[in-house]
Image: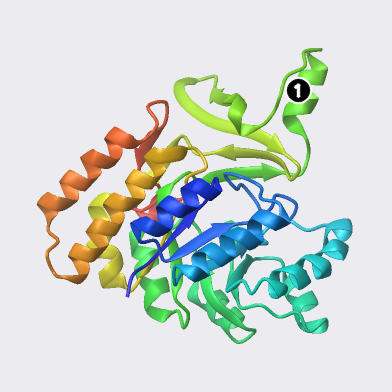
Amino acid sequence: MIKIITTVESIEQAEQLLEAGVDELYFGQDEFGLRLPNSFNREDQEKLTKMAHDAGKTVSIAVNAILHNEDIEKLPEYLEFLKSIKVDSITVGDPGAIHIMRKNDLFIPFRYDAQVMVTNSRQINFWKERGAIEAVIARELPKEELEKLAKNSKLPVEMLVYGATCIQQSRRPLLQNYFNYIKKYDSYGKERGFFISDPNDSSTHYSVYQDINGTHTFANNDINMSLHLLDLVKMGIFTWKFDGIFTPGKNFVEIVKLFIKAKNEILNREWNSDKAKVLNESVKMLHPKNRGMDTGFYMIDPSMIR
């Protein structure tokens, strides 16, 4: 009834997550997938897929990059590889990629993910008619709009329950350009820990990094839906995503374990508000100290969003 999907940063972490009871591993390589904790080579993608299948679980591969002409030309060969290792699904938002799957007899069941664009059930239902099996809803939706979307969607919808939210992406190498301008040279990846702040608000802390897909900027706070899990169930949102891009190693595994325990208690009708508060505090203890948490747009009045 409730599916737990998690990102993966290593083979070792994947083993721990599968042992913890996750339902689906989400990974890929950064040539075709956006904002992954790690970019896995082909050998490791095959190894992870077999590992999940041996555990009776599934995998979904990130193919959600913004694909330009040179990228789309490389896609058929990658899809052939994914079909050969029998992945269960891919996550994709580029209609060109979906067209290539059909044109070249390379169809893989796909979760539709057009980032901030997936804000209404009609769009989701449109892609259901074109083969989508699930849809990743935008992270900028308040509760009132989520209720309407979930009620009218003909596909299962995936929602971020824990993890970081990207608020801007540019294909341009903005960090590299900046350092070139000031004649200082540094690494630009997420491990460097760069952030930018609003000059008029010193409390802002927008994480930013650069990779082969360009420059990515993240919201001040990460998402934590600990206190609202029953709301999601009542809405019919049963696919829960956990993103560990800024929560590395064992702590991410322990956070996922806490939510799996909550999932089981919800299914056994043992969940209550007191347990939700305990979960919330436990997640805070494991969350990176330099990153805040909130519920994103969830509690915002829709009329206040501009």
Give the color scheme: rainbow, by chain, secondary structure or one colour.
rainbow
Which residue occupies 36% across, 53% down?
298
Q: Is residue 189 visible?
A: yes
Q: Is residue 272 left or right of residue 18?
A: left
Q: Is residue 166 left or right of residue 215?
A: left
Which residue occupies 51% across, 53% down?
7
Helix, strand or loop under label 1: helix
Q: Is residue 299 visible?
A: no
Q: Identify whether 265 is placed above or below 192.
A: below
Number of numbered tags placed on the structure image:
1
Q: Residue furthest bottom?
A: 129
Residue 186 in the image, given as x and y percentages of width and height:
73, 19
Q: Residues within 10 Å of mark 1 (few under 14, many from 20)?
A: few
Residue 59 in the image, given as x and y percentages of width and height:
54, 66
Residue 16 in the image, given as x and y percentages of width and height:
41, 51
Which residue occupies 27% across, 50% down?
258
Observer-nearest of 178 and 160: 160
Observer-nearest of 233 and 251: 251
Residue 137 in the image, given as x and y percentages of width and height:
49, 64
Q: Residue furthest top?
A: 183
Q: Identify whether 197 is placed above or below 55.
A: above
Observer-nearest of 296 and 254: 254
Which residue occupies 50% across, 60% down?
25
Q: Disc 1 marks which amino acid?
A: Tyr
State the residue position of label 1: 178
Q: Quadrant of the N terminus?
A: bottom left
Q: Is residue 264 left or right of residue 105?
A: left
